[in-house]
Image: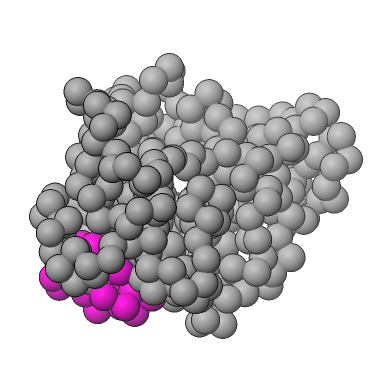
Amino acid sequence: MAPIPKMMRAAVVHAPGGPEALKLEQRPVPKPENGQVLIRVHAFGLNRAEMFTRQGDSPDVRFPRILGIEAAGVVAAAPGGEFPEGTVVATVVGGMGRSFDGGYAEYTLVPASQVKVVQADVGWEILGALPEIIQTAWGALFSSLRLEKGEKLLVRGGSSSVGLAAAAIARHHGAFVVSTSRSQSREKLLRDSGAQDMILENGSIADEARKRYPDGFDKVLELVGTSTLTDSLKTVKKGGIVCMAGIVGGTWVLEKFEPFIIPSGVYLTTYASSVEAFMETPLDEIARLVKSGALRIPIKTFRFEEIVEAHRVMDGSTAEGKLVVLID
């Protein structure tokens, strides 16, 4: 590997704001200590959590901050000997981009305990796209929802990157997948990624869902959030499960929550990203499936110099796939 430079490019937010709040500037390359890994970042995915942080809506985040809750690259240094230099790795969450500087930089410094070795021979655009969406989709489907082959799954917020990934994985697993979107024009996108049916999202789809599937869904992955959660609970059959794993709708709190909004015999759970879940995610297997085309997860790439434009696309919800920034 090339020698580690003293300075690096980083996308820094000094104060909350719109996409233009991201400033590309020179920063010192962090110096790793025992138990830490310095990663030369080659790609990172964009996530709505970073949009919320940029807007000032993430609690306890202090600015200036380098954003980014995930990154993929190669090990530049690991003083504790956990990984050889040059090892291809990925990392997510654990405080990245919130408690400490994250992946929006040429180098990122993270605890060795949240670094996962990647053996799949795939391009950086794939590896940059997968860590966070796959650990969220996989964890929600199989840890929280306990999805089984042959079950009917409703993905609420299906055109989000996690929704597209979840549909692809669930379909590959043998589930029957129905996804929602606010735009009829996205039906082809949803079907190409794994959905077998689409319901037009208007915030209240329970009646339409019951009309098409009178017995209800076995499982519901709720990615829109609290604004549609009560409605999603009405679409599930007795014994079914609803898992809230996203807030695409932007509403964090369910106002005036009453436990009896949960129908008798229906179960409500959540899924939240964690380092532990990421380390258990079959990232290599999923990456190979994406490369082969067996799983179709749309990816849109940007250069590091285009980070502001990438955030504008994310803010406008026009991506129709996972946004990935590649760093030369």
* Furthest residue in direction right, as rendered: 81
Instruction: Provide residue 327's location: percent of width, then percent of height.
Output: 52, 55
Residue shown at 87% from the left, 34% from the top: 80
Q: How is the image coloured?
A: one colour
Say which of 197 and 43 sits in front: 197
Residue shown at 66% from the left, 41% from the top: 276
Q: Quadrant of residue 87?
A: bottom right
Q: Is 263 situated left or right of 111 in this image? A: left
Q: Quadrant of residue 207?
A: bottom left
Residue shown at 23% from the left, 50% from the top: 234
In magenta segment, residue 185: yes
Say which of 254 and 166 sits in front: 254
Instruction: Provide residue 64's location: percent of width, then percent of height.
Output: 42, 22
Q: Quadrant of the C terminus?
A: bottom right
Instruction: Provide residue 24's location: percent of width, then percent of height.
Output: 41, 39
Residue 266 is at least partly visible in this image? yes
Instruction: Provide residue 15's location: percent of width, then percent of height.
Output: 32, 22
Q: Is 210 situated left or right of 193 in this image? A: left
Q: Quadrant of residue 208?
A: bottom left
Region of the chain picked out in magenta, as a range: 178-197
Q: Is 139 situated left or right of 204 in this image? A: right
